[in-house]
Structure formats: C-alpha cells, structure tokens
C-alpha cells in the first residue's frame, strides 16, 4: 500500500497519467461498435436521449442490414404507413415529406400539442401548416440561393439557418415567422429521432414576440352595435339587408365566420330553439340554444324566404368587411371585424351573467373557459365598470367589512 500511495503521488507530481481506453467506436451515424467485444449496436436519438439496441453481430454488413430495418421500425412507431429509405443519409426533402404526410393526416407538428390534442387537428390548421412548409422551401431558395430539399440534413450550415431567420423575420408577420420556424424545427426533430442528426442548428434562433393588434382591442357597446347594423341596412346597396343579417348572426351566435357561412335551414330547429353548427374548427358539430334576439332574427329571415328548402344556406352574403368598417366609422364606434363579433358575443355573455364554462361551450372552446377569461374578460370588465355607481344615496352602508 505504501508503494501504491507513493506511485500515485509521484504520478500527480510529474503529470504522468494513464489514458482510459475508448469502450465504444462510432462507425456510422446510428452505428457503434464495442471496442473489446467487437459487437455492433444501434444508437438512436429521441428528444435528446440515446436509445440503444444490440444488433447481435460482429459483421459490418449484417449490422448495416439490421440497422436499416430498425430505423424503419423506429419511424413507423408513430403510425406512419410510408417510411423513407433509412439506409442512406437523409436530405431535408425526406424529412419534409414525412412532415407533410403527418400534417395531411391531421397530426400536430408540436409534440406537446400532440399529447394534448384530442383527435385530428382541424383542416384549416392542416392547410396553414402545409403553407408554412412551402414558405420555408421558397424563402430558403430566395435568401440562401440553394434548394433546401436537396441539402443533406446533417450538413445544414448554421450560418445559412441564421441568415434565413434574420432575413425572413423582417419579411413576414411575427406569427408567420414563428410558424415557419416551427416547421423547420419539426424537420430537425424528425432527423434527430431517426439518428440522422445529433445537433440542432436552430437552437440559437429566438421566436418573434407577438404584437397584439389594435383591431378589436375595444369593442362597441350594445347601443353602438345597433347603430352599426342600422347603418348597414340603410346603405342602399342591393345586398345591404343580407350583409346586416350576417353581422347580426355572428354577433348573436358567437360563431366563426366560416361556421355561420355553413349554416343551412336544416340546422335551425325552431321547435327546440336550437342552432347546430355542422362545419366547425375541430370537425365536431356544436349545438347552441337560441337566445331571444337570435330566434327573432332567424324567424324574420325564414318568413321573408319561406320558399327556400331545408338545404338552402341561411347566409347569402359573407364578405362584409368593407361595409362593416364603413358603418363603424360612420357611427364613431371602434372598428370591429367579423371575428371581433365573436368577442362581442363573449363580452355580452359575461356581462349578462352567463357562467364562463357555459359561454366557452357555446363558443366551441375545449379548455373549460381558460381562453375566454384570458381574452375577453378584460373587455367585459371594462364595460361593466362603467355601470358602477358611487354617487347614489341608496343603499345605506353601515359599519365596515370584517
């Protein structure tokens, strides 16, 4: 023991150290070999974690064949019916095709969103995601002067990614840039999960801060809304009445513009006083009760158009943006859009004492009212505060709160 201690002390003094031999030898992107036994192992990466699988062979040719099969199985775990040739190195186009396939199947691009998502994502979301894929390829060509699809994914230059992000964020809105950046990161994630890439070239790129639009920041009051509708009806245009009806339908139902556009008279039940949206954002029909104002509006519209069948559309005009803006300007009310009328409905619900959960169900939300509170409660509170009175004599308050 004395010799051992003396030897260690001498080694520390003289700097003499023994280098630990390497146990694993990296053979390929996903293929490693144990230095002592000579056996091959597959190593895949998912979410930054390594996953190992013994290939049970010492022959490189056999290991390559088994590795290709494992890669295909690894990619097919998510239920994809089509998998690329994983025996060769990926181009960005391979990952883009996988992403486009999943988007077309209604699968969420973000893993966290996919866990929380119930069922398939909406068709409108699928279309938007597909647009970001096309925008990514097109903008990369314009900014970097190369075809993104043909680049080998493991050799994407970090400088090119940063150049694209710096230029593209100045060309589009904050939301569009964040969505396109999310598409690029989804492509990188596909490659990392397949063991084709071990680094993230987008790690230093920050998302753009979303700036809230001033449109619909202030909503009209009920008297102002009535004046807006009256102004639209008296404009003298041949479709003035139909445009005003559409605006009122949006305001009294809280439906999205495309949901209201898809209404037919078969969806209107005057006996049960219910209205059913068949075309919705999540693809699931939604039935709401008719309030008195909505029932009177639909009854008047049906009486005027009694010859129309059950399959006829309730809405005749849907593009009311210009006329709605002119009416708001004429009345002197805050400018409101078609989607802003959904916020108007939410505000009236909260002011009328409708509980948050019920109002969120009428709107088609599936979060129990969280979005409703975050988005519309502030405007409802601002309008409700105007009704508070502290200058009256009744009731008399005695004592102080305990």
Image (spheres, helix red, strand yellow):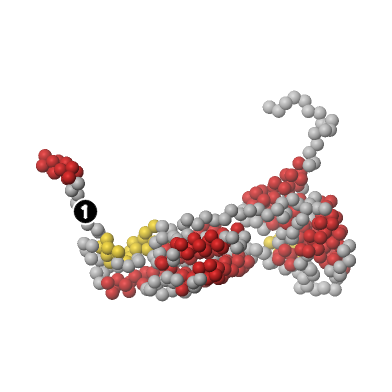
Q: Quick one: 304 or 44, which is closer to the camera?
A: 44
Q: With 209 as the anchor, is 162 left or right in this view?
A: left
Instruction: Residue at 53% x, 67% y: name it.
Output: 143
Quadrant for residue 85, please give it. bottom left
Residue under circle 1?
A: 19
- Vertical comparison of 353 with 22: above or below: above
Q: Quick one: 130 or 313, which is closer to the camera?
A: 130
Instruction: Residue at 68% x, 61% y: name it.
Output: 286
**Secondary structure of the residue carrying numbered label 1:** loop
- Vertical comparison of 36 with 7: above or below: below
Residue at the farthest top position? 399
Instruction: Residue at 26% x, 69% y: name it.
Output: 57
Q: With 52 as the anchor, is 8 left or right in this view?
A: left
What is the crowding at mark 1: few (fewer than 14 residues within 10 Å), some, or many (at least 20)? few
Q: Position of residue 261 (x, y in %)?
A: 74, 67
- Vertical comparison of 221 with 364: above or below: above
Instruction: Residue at 32% x, 72% y: name it.
Output: 64
Q: Position of residue 191 (x, y in %)?
A: 43, 66
Q: Quick one: 33 or 73, which is closer to the camera?
A: 33
Residue at the farthest left position? 3
Quadrant for residue 210, please give it. bottom right
Residue 223 visible at all: yes
Q: Position of residue 63 (x, y in %)?
A: 30, 71
* The C terminus lies in quadrant: top right
Q: Position of residue 4 (x, y in %)?
A: 13, 43
């Amino acid at each position: 023991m004395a010799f051992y201690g003396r030897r260690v002390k001498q080694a520390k003094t003289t700097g003499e150290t023994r280098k630990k031999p390497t146990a694993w030898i990296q053979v390929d992107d996903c293929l490693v070999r144990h230095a002592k036994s000579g056996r091959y192992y597959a190593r895949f990466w998912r979410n930054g974690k390594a996953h190992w699988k013994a290939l049970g062979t010492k022959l490189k040719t056999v290991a390559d064949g088994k590795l290709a099969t494992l890669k295909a199985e690894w990619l097919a775990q998510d239920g994809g019916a089509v998998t690329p040739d994983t025996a060769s190195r990926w181009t960005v186009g391979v990952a883009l095709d996988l992403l486009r396939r999943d988007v077309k199947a209604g699968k969420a691009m973000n893993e966290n969103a996919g866990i929380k998502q119930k069922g398939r994502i909406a068709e409108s979301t699928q279309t938007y995601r597909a647009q970001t894929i096309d925008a990514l390829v097109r903008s990369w060509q314009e900014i970097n002067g190369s075809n993104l699809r043909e680049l080998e994914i493991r050799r994407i230059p970090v400088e090119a990614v940063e150049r694209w992000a710096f230029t593209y964020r100045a060309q589009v809105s904050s939301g569009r840039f964040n969505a396109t950046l999310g598409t690029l990161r989804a492509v990188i994630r596909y490659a990392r999960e397949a063991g084709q890439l071990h680094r993230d070239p987008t790690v230093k790129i920050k998302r753009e801060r979303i700036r809230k639009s001033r449109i619909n920041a202030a909503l009209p009051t009920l008297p102002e809304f009535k004046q807006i509708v009256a102004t639209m009806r008296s404009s003298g245009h041949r479709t003035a009445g139909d445009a005003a009806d559409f605006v009122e339908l949006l305001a009294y139902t809280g439906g999205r513009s495309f949901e209201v556009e898809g209404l037919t008279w078969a969806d209107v039940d005057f006996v049960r006083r219910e209205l059913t949206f068949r075309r919705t954002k999540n693809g699931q029909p939604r039935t709401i009760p008719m309030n008195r104002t909505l029932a009177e509006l639909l009854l008047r519209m049906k009486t005027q158009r009694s010859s129309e069948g059950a399959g006829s559309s309730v809405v005749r005009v849907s593009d009311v943006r210009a006329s709605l803006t002119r009416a708001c300007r004429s009345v002197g009310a805050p400018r409101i859009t078609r989607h802003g009328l959904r916020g108007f409905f939410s505000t009236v619900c909260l002011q009328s004492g409708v509980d948050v959960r019920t109002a969120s169900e009428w709107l088609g939300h599936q979060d129990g009212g969280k979005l409703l509170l975050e988005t519309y409660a502030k405007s409802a509170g601002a309008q409700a505060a105007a009704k508070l009175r502290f200058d009256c004599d009744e009731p008399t308050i005695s004592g102080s709160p305990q």
